[in-house]
């Protein structure tokens, strides 16, 4: 039997117990302490907004070295320091590996909540990766004031209900030729959720069970990323019984000595490989920048030098999701406004839209500047029939 727990807080959790054949044995919701986890395999589903699902480019890396390479491959995509983040590895496809990034603070909070009520998780999974996965379709499920979206084997995100329409349009535009033929929406017909007009088929399905029951029924372990990796992985339990036989004790002692020796050999080998890799990086850096006198951290120095050559400057403090959320609040206040296209690059959002007239366009710009505290540039405004076609470039407030 398996126990699935959808964990939000100590006082807010939902759960379902499934038999080996997938039949629901029991389900409920309430405080975490009320859940009886005796003897079951425990899979804990945590909020998708707390996990960044992305891909890292790691050319030529061996599997055992990925855990060391991935944080540096993703360093520029993260707001917080890599030392504050936990990186859980998923499927490896060529030189790309799927990664779930969660803060150490969140991991420790979840484990502490479970430990307080005597629950030991076998797996901790971002809830979006428990949604059903169907070919050429995206999955959307409403859970309270959140929309869980799965748009790939190990990709997805949690959307805010208020900005879901804008986010979906942007994600479909970003997908390009890889966009799905349909979006299957479960339980998204109410609770203030407005389904946007999209150029894909929307299949709306009603939901009668708790969301955790739907997630548990659809869960496929091979398509998920278990966050219990690295320092958070479970150690194998020692045998239930230890018989105090001298022969067994001697064999155990020999085994421990051999394993300890192997560990030392592996550690020395990995240290030598790391030293060789750092030497290669330093050599490449000196060849690329021969004027460099002192090399302390060749990788970081090379990244800064390349950024300087590209003319990199200060970036907006808001990312794609934050810009969409802030701008979306102001877009909703303009009547007769249709967004045609969204693109995001280097901390700025380019928006192509139709609006009633130039006066409303100017009012929209002023709201974005005054209320959302954003930097707005009207790049073009052209009359098209009885409306105005305009292009805006939006940036967040300077950090």
Image (spheres, grey):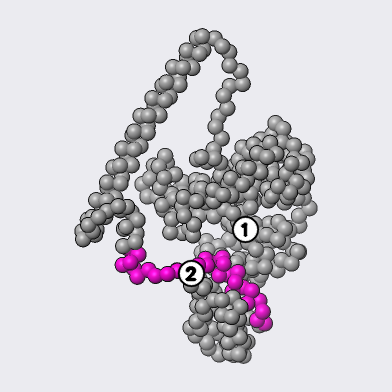
- Is 314 one of the magenta-colored residues? yes
* Percent position of residue 84, x then y: 50, 51
Check disc 1 and report its element: helix, strand or loop.
strand
Work out whether 119 lies above or below 186.
above
Label 2 Cα crowd, 10 Å radius (few <14 / some 14-19 / many 20+): few
Work out whether 198 lies above or below 58.
below
Q: Work out which quarter of the rendered image holds the N terminus and state it.
A: top right
Q: Residue at x 33, y 34 (%)?
A: 269
Instruction: Using the numbered discs, state the Cα–Cα distance from disc 2 to disc 1 in whole angstroms.
Output: 26 Å
Q: Is residue 261 visible?
A: yes
First in sequence: mark 2 vs mark 1? 1
- Is 341 one of the magenta-colored residues? no
- Whether residue 354 sits left or right of residue 313 in the image: it is right
* Percent position of residue 191, x then y: 75, 64
Q: Residue at x 49, y 60 (%)?
A: 79
Disc 2 vs disc 1: which is toward the camera? 2
* Percent position of residue 277, x then y: 31, 45
- Whether residue 91 sits left or right of residue 62 in the image: it is right
Q: Is residue 338 visible?
A: no
Q: Toward the viewer: 134 or 312?
A: 312
Q: Residue at x 77, y 43 (%)?
A: 27
Q: Quadrant of residue 173?
A: bottom right
Label 2: which residue? 399
Check disc 2 and report its element: helix, strand or loop.
loop
Q: How many numbered dots are placed on residues in this image?
A: 2
- Whether residue 275 sits left or right of residue 369 in the image: it is left
Q: Toward the viewer: 388 or 226?
A: 226
* Percent position of residue 56, x then y: 45, 53
Magenta segment boundaries in residue numbering: 306-335
Label 1: which residue? 158
């Amino acid at each position: 039997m398996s126990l699935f727990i959808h964990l939000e807080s100590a006082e807010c959790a939902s759960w379902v117990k499934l038999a080996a054949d997938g039949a629901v044995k029991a389900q409920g919701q309430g405080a975490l302490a009320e859940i009886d986890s005796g003897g079951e395999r425990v899979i804990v589903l945590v909020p998708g907004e707390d996990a960044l699902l992305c891909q890292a480019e790691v050319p030529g890396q061996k599997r055992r070295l990925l855990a060391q390479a991935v944080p540096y491959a993703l360093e520029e995509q993260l707001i917080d320091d890599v030392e504050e983040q936990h990186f859980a590895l998923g499927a490896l496809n060529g030189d790309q590996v799927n990664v779930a990034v969660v803060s150490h603070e969140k991991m420790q909070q979840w484990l502490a909540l479970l430990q307080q009520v005597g629950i030991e998780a076998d797996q901790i999974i971002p809830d979006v990766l428990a949604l059903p996965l169907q070919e050429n379709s995206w999955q959307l499920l409403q859970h309270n004031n959140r929309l869980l979206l799965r748009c790939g084997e190990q990709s997805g995100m949690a959307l805010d209900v208020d900005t879901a329409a804008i986010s979906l349009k942007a994600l479909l535009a970003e997908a390009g030729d890889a966009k799905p033929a349909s979006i299957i929406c479960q339980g998204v017909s109410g609770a203030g959720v407005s389904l946007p007009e999209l150029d894909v088929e929307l299949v709306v399905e009603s939901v009668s069970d708790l969301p955790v029951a739907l997630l548990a029924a659809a869960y496929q372990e091979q398509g998920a990323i278990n966050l219990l990796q690295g320092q958070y992985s479970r150690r194998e339990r020692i045998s239930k019984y230890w018989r105090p036989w001298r022969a067994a004790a001697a064999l155990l002692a020999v085994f421990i000595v051999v394993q300890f020796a192997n560990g030392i050999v592996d550690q020395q080998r990995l240290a030598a490989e790391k030293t060789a890799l750092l030497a290669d990086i330093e050599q490449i850096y000196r060849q690329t920048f021969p004027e460099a006198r002192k090399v302390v951290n060749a990788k970081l120095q090379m990244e800064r030098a390349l950024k300087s050559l590209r003319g990199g400057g200060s970036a907006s403090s808001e990312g794609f999701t934050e810009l969409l959320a802030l701008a979306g609040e102001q877009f909703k206040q303009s009547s007769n406004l249709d967004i045609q296209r969204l693109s995001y690059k280097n901390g700025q959002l380019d928006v192509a839209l139709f609006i009633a007239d130039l006066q409303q366009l100017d009012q929209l710009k002023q709201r974005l500047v005054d209320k959302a505290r954003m930097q707005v540039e009207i790049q073009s405004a052209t009359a098209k029939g009885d409306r105005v076609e305009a292009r805006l470039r939006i940036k967040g407030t300077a950090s």
